[in-house]
Image (cartoon, rainbow, N blue to C red):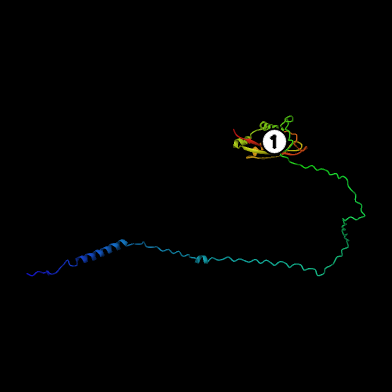
Amino acid sequence: MEPKKNPKADLTKNSSMYFVIGLAVVMLIIWRALEWRTYDEQTTYDTSLNVEDMLDEEVPMTEQIKTPPPPPPPAAPEIITVVEDEVEVEETVIKSTETSQEEEIIEVDDISVDEVEEDIDVPFAVIEDVPVFPGCENEKDKRACFNDMMQQHIRKNFRYPEIAQEMGVQGRVSVMFVIQKDGSIGNVRMRGPDQNLEKEAQRIISKLPKMTPGKQRGRAVRVPFSIPITFKLQ
């Protein structure tokens, strides 16, 4: 009995090449499977604007009002009448100020000049004779006595406004006034954090007595004075 296979045939001759080709084909199929992508179907929308209905809108007819032209200006008169000026105007004659040799020159010995008193404000710190507060007439240092009497007057007449206490308002009010040439108090001004405190400060200053006016070079002058009044809640 003869064998069916050829004994010279080598079945493993190209097996390694076929293995490499098969491996490459398998790797290619796997790579394509990993890279495969699917996309959702896109729905397209019609974004066009239908303007046919808008174009069919009727435009209302407008009537143009014609304004009549302005009337023509009046014509100028053709005949011009000349009116004669019968009033005589006297000419102003300017006399010469030059003196002639015939005029006599009169010598003036004394010319009396009336002195005009000017209102001068002299600050309290630099005035020669300070205003005298009632009760300080016999004191040597009238300036210090004036300040002490002012403090006593403020403490004696001080009254905290009730509305300011309820609102919790406190602060410092700067008061400025002028001791007039007759010793009275005038031109009172205040500046503070609240109107109620300012009114109270004005009330205290209005109760100041009439003083002996301050003097500068022996003449009575106005003396500005300023003092702070502190309002503080306990």
Residue 56 % position (x, y): 52, 67
At 50% from the left edge and 65% from the top edge, which residue is drawn? 53
Number of marks in the image? 1
Q: Residue furthest right?
A: 102
Q: Quadrant of the N terminus?
A: bottom left
Quarter of image, res 182: top right
- Closest to the observer, 224 or 173: 224
Quarter of image, res 42: bottom left
Q: Quadrant of the C terminus?
A: top right
Q: Is residue 101 above or below residue 51?
A: above
Residue 25 % position (x, y): 26, 65
- SS of the residue under disc 1: helix
Residue 92 % position (x, y): 87, 58
Position of 152 with respect to 92 (left or right) is left
- Closest to the observer, 53 or 16: 16
At 29% from the left edge and 62% from the top edge, which residue is drawn? 31
- Closest to the observer, 152 or 162: 152
Which amino acid, by three-letter code, is at mark 1? Ile
At 69% from the left edge and 35% from the top edge, which residue is drawn? 205
Q: Which residue is mark 1?
A: 205
Residue 120 % position (x, y): 75, 41
Position of 83 with respect to 159 (left or right) is right
Q: Residue furthest left?
A: 1
- Closest to the observer, 187 or 116: 116
| Crowd tier of the residue under label 1, counting other residues whose Cα lies within 10 Å: few below 14, some 14–19, many 20 or above | some
Q: Is residue 18 above or below residue 102?
A: below
At 23% from the left edge and 65% from the top edge, which residue is drawn? 20
